[in-house]
Amino acid sequence: MTPVGLLFKVNSEGLFTCPVNASPVDYAKIYPDPESEKAIMGSVVYCIHHKEGCQWSDELRKLKAHLNTCKHDAVLCAAQCGAMIPRVLMQDHLRYTCPRRRANCEHCHKEFSGSALEEHQGNCGHEPVYCENKCGAKVQRRHTQQHIQQHCSKRLVPCRHCGQRYTQDTVTAHGATCSRAPVPCPQRCAAAPVPRDELDAHLRDHCTAAGVSCAFRDAGCRFKGTRQALDRHTEESCQQHLALVSALATRQARQLESLRAAVARLSVNCSGALVWRITDWAAKMAEAKCKDGVELLSPMFYTSQHGYKLQASLFLNGNGAGEGTHMSVYIKILPGEYDALLRWPFSHTVSFTLFDQSSSPDRACNIVESFVPDPTWKNFQRPSKEPDALGFGFPRFVSHEMLKKRNFVKDDVMFLRVKVDPSKIVAV
């Protein structure tokens, strides 16, 4: 005979159940033999809650009685919530999870049913919660708005002086630097406290106790006193102030002259090459033809920083052999500041270049003339205080006919370069 416990399960009512679909099975139909039934009912079985930890085992006929007291067997909730709860978990269920349990809120201590308590939790006005402004304080939920409005250190409050809003914990520090906060006069005058950003104006224009400098301070007057004393000083010191202003004007005039001289020195050409821009050429040519000896003088230039001092001379209507037909050009050696240190006679190669201002540089045809100074000529000796009246150069540098053929004059402007080269001993 196959043991029943291996083929069939026994439910809580002591009935056999099919191991396939768990439906009740009448064991009398399975074993119609009374002897077999007696043998089965006397066989030893384990409690159906053996896997849950129940250690009971006995005859099958005693299983139903055991299940009536088995702590692992499920029974209806004692509070009649409808749930089937194992006896061993009944107390926990009734205390913590039964929706019909009665319990007190730990914050307000009011009694609620289980489901009502779950809804109440998270909304209880007595529950302590952290401030939503993150100030770190914990207050009862019912007092959060009052805390945020009246006590929270992170609430925004306006500065009573400037009206700007700051958090409560920083508004005091702001007050120490607020531009509109009233501050007393540092000179302890009788005036009421003034806003911080108006203090300088108060000291400068209104404070009766502040020390005020004389208006002629820059001229050298050292007086400093109250406004009343300053008024008396101004009335009594007119002659003194006039003398100070006169002395200041004299010093400034000297300084101005010194600055002009320094600027003039810095603007002097010391490169040994001058590009002379002759403007209003037509008017100057017309004047040269109407008057005799009209001479144009270039800006002065030096061969180096401490070199020879030179100047170019131009006769648009010619001079000497070129008068009336050519343009004449000369170089003059002027008395310079460093003549005592220079070698004489002057021996640098001098070249003149009249630029052709053609729109195509490749097709330009410049006129170039140069010479090597003759050391025996007076023009190249160390100059006296009065420079040579004419200088040395080319009376017939370029003819008037040639000037008309090319673009030597363009937009009423002519360019003439004068270059002095100490390294060349042959005219090029």
Image (tube, grey):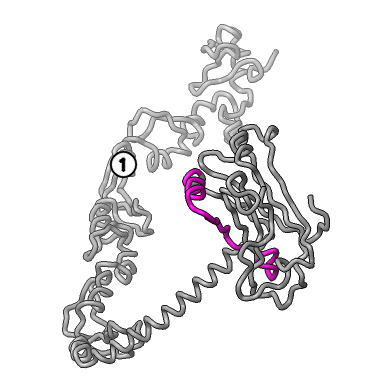
Tell me what residue is drawn at x 29 percent, y 44 percent. Answer: 123
- Relative to 312, residue 217 above or below: below
Q: Is residue 370 visible?
A: yes
Give the x, y percent position of residue 428.
Answer: 79, 49
290 in the magenta segment = yes
Give the x, y percent position of residue 369.
Answer: 72, 49
- Relative to 7, residue 29 above or below: above
Relative to 304, 204 lies left or right: left
Foreground of the two, 234 or 329 = 329
Tell me what residue is drawn at x 35 percent, y 82 percent. Answer: 218
Going by the numbered disc 1, the residue's amino acid type is Leu
Quarter of the image for residue 297 reads bottom right
Tell me what residue is drawn at x 58 percent, y 69 percent. Answer: 265
Quarter of the image for residue 179 reads bottom left
Secondary element under disc 1, as helix, strand or loop, is: helix
Give the x, y percent position of residue 254.
Answer: 45, 80
Relative to 292, 92 lies left or right: left
Quarter of the image for residue 393 reads bottom right
Q: Quadrant of the N terminus?
A: top right
Q: Is residue 109 visible?
A: no
Relative to 166, 43 lies left or right: right
Q: Residues within 10 Å of mark 1 (few under 14, many from 20)?
A: some
- Relative to 51, residue 422 above or below: below
388 in the magenta segment = no
Relative to 379, 132 lies left or right: left
Q: Which residues are magenta?
A: 282-309
Give the x, y percent position of residue 139.
Answer: 31, 57
The residue wearing badge 1 is 117
Tell me what residue is drawn at x 54 percent, y 27 percent. Answer: 63
